[in-house]
Image (cartoon, rainbow, N blue to C red):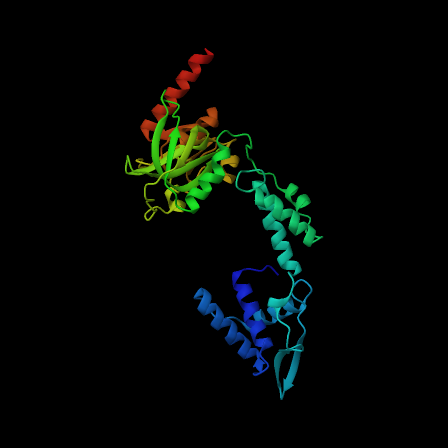
């Protein structure tokens, strides 16, 4: 049985009932106790069914759960539930097999950060956990999943300090080398967010000079230091929504547009199973091609994505995007002509 937030709340509610020797808890009382806890902590008032409570008890009694010493006492035709040991509680028990499995899965994912600055503690905690739980074996589990990550990326050494600057709300003075300018730029940044795109990391923070967020590639940061200026907290940007209408990190000052693409039929299965964006939908289906629509901000990252598919994609609209792609292809053709 997979554990989740609601299940954990129910298990602890049942544990309190089974531990209470001053009251008899029948099945109806257990249902009511679980429902009350779910309403208090999650606002859920749908109501737990009898079958769910019986499943929860069965799990708590199993070795995958806590192997609880539960007794069933008859009171006429009814049955109430109570621990045989007054001192028993699942809160006092060691980690169970189900929790151990979840911990193993989580740590195997966390291990992708090993070697990154500011995450040296992961290496230490993995060793300590493996020595404590001999059957955890994180080292072998972590080899199950391969993450695409460039450990040799320039600027990655700044990640830990930038992470802390965001966490502890520190204003930064950053020396930044824009590829389009000879001189390095010096700017004040109030850091808010770190985002990875196309195997590169970007820092997003408020820039008082322009009164809007700046997007800085870590590999272009020369160095930075903490500033004495008061930190301007982020009170307006929800970063889950901030990048929702764009591919990549270039989003500021760009309006969402309707983009129509013509996809060769041989390529369509790849794009159907791995959509360009969540807004992707099919407009027309033909024998040799599919026409799709996207609602996106037109930026450099979108252009690059389209060009990466070469001759199998044609931009139908908007016209300015079609012209940009055509101009870039003309330049490419000239290099190979």
Residue 15 lies, with reference to residue 231, above or below; the image says below
Q: Identify which residue, 203 or 295, lies in the foreground.
A: 203
Residue drawn at x 46%, y 66% is 41
Horizontal side, residue 136 vs residue 309: left or right: right
Residue drawn at x 56%, y 69% is 12
Residue 327 in view, yes or no: yes
Q: Position of residue 11 (x, y in %)?
A: 57, 68
Q: Give left or right: position of 256 versus 70.
A: left
Q: Quadrant of residue 114?
A: top right
User: Which residue is more in the foreground, 83 or 75?
Assistant: 83
| Residue nearest the viewer, comparing 221 with 204 | 221
User: Which quadrant would the C terminus be assigned to in this image?
Assistant: top left
- Quadrant housing residue 113: top right
- Rendered image quadrant of residue 282: top left
Q: Residue furthest top?
A: 337
One can see residue 246 in this view: no
In the orientation shown, which residue stands out farthest toward the bottom?
A: 76
Residue 2 appears at what percent x and percent y?
A: 59, 59
Looking at the image, residue 161 sits to the left or right of residue 141; the answer is left
* Location of residue 7 in the rendering, given as x and y in whole percent from the top left corner: 55, 64
How many marks on residues?
0
Which image quarter is the N terminus in? Answer: bottom right
Q: Nearer the viewer, residue 238 or 186?
A: 186
Q: Residue at x 40, y 33 (%)?
A: 216
Q: Position of residue 241 (x, y in %)?
A: 38, 45
């Amino acid at each position: 049985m997979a554990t989740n937030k609601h299940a954990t709340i129910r298990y602890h509610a049942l544990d309190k009932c089974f531990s209470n020797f001053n009251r008899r808890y029948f099945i109806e009382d257990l249902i009511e106790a679980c429902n009350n806890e779910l309403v208090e902590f999650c606002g859920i008032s749908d109501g737990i069914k009898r079958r769910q409570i019986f499943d929860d008890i069965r799990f708590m009694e199993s070795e995958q759960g806590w192997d609880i010493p539960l007794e069933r006492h008859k009171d006429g035709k009814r049955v109430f539930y109570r621990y045989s040991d007054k001192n028993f509680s699942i809160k006092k028990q060691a980690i169970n097999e189900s929790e151990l499995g979840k911990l193993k899965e989580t740590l195997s994912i966390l291990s992708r950060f090993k070697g990154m600055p500011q995450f040296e503690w992961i290496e230490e905690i993995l060793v300590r956990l493996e020595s404590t739980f001999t059957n955890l074996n994180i080292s072998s589990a972590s080899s199950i999943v391969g993450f695409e990550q460039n450990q040799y990326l320039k600027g990655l050494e700044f990640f830990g300090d930038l992470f802390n600057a965001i966490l502890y709300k520190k204003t930064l003075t950053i020396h930044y080398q824009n590829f389009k300018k000879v001189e390095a730029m010096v700017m004040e940044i109030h850091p808010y967010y770190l985002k990875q795109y196309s195997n590169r990391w970007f820092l997003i923070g408020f820039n008082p000079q322009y009164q809007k967020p700046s997007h800085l590639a870590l590999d272009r940061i020369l160095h930075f230091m903490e500033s004495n200026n008061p930190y301007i907290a982020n009170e307006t940007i929800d970063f889950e929504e901030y990048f929702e209408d764009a591919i990549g990190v270039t989003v500021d000052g760009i309006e969402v547009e309707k983009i129509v693409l013509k996809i060769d039929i041989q390529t369509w299965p790849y794009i159907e199973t791995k959509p360009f964006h969540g807004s992707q939908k099919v407009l027309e289906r033909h024998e040799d091609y599919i026409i799709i629509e996207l609602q996106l901000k037109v930026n450099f990252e979108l252009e690059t994505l389209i060009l990466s598919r070469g001759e199998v994609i044609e931009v139908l609209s908007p016209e300015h995007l079609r012209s940009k792609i055509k101009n870039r292809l003309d330049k490419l053709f000239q290099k190979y002509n």
